[in-house]
Image (cartoon, rainbow, N blue to C red):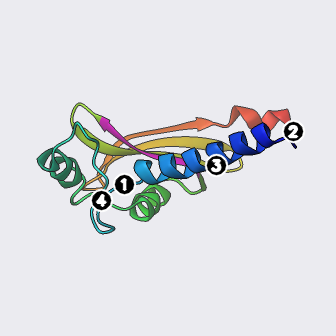
Amino acid sequence: MNKKTGLGIGLLAICSVIGFTAYQSNAAPTEPIVAASETKEETVEKQDRFDGVLSIEEAKQIALTEFEGKVTEIELDEDDGRLMYEVELKNETHEAEIELDARTGDIIELDIEEDDDRWDD
């Protein structure tokens, strides 16, 4: 290795360390990292929006009382300002899609269909 290549690699390593150090967040470990364009009040509002929301495990248990099977997918979604869980379940013969209110656990929609994939085996 020639002298110029060694210097170039050394400078690259130093710049990488300096760049990484400058990039690190200055947030305290107990505070959430906030986007530069976001105020603390906006961050608190977003966190408050999820107060009282059922856990994923609670949503799964409610869905399993409506349809016996295996949960294949669960997602927290917002529709017209209402937080809801969309839960997909499957058993040997049928599949179900259940929407439930993320705060109350009330069933919004229950759709059970015959599993078309079972004939592919």
Q: What label sits on residue 13 in the rendered view?
A: 3
Helix, strand or loop at disc 1?
loop
Disc nearest the viewer among 3 and 4: 3
Mark 3 is on which residue type?
Ala
- Is residue 52 rendered to the left or right of residue 54? left
Q: What label sits on residue 27 in the rendered view?
A: 4
Residue pushed farthest left? Answer: 41
Foreground residue among 29 and 111: 29
Which residue lies under the disc numbered 2? 121
- Residue at 26% x, 40% y is 36
Disc nearest the viewer among 4 and 2: 4
- Residue at 58% x, 35% y is 113
Residue 43, x across and y down, in percent: 20, 49
Disc nearest the viewer among 1 and 3: 3
Residue 107, x across and y down, in percent: 33, 48
Which residue lies under the disc numbered 1? 25
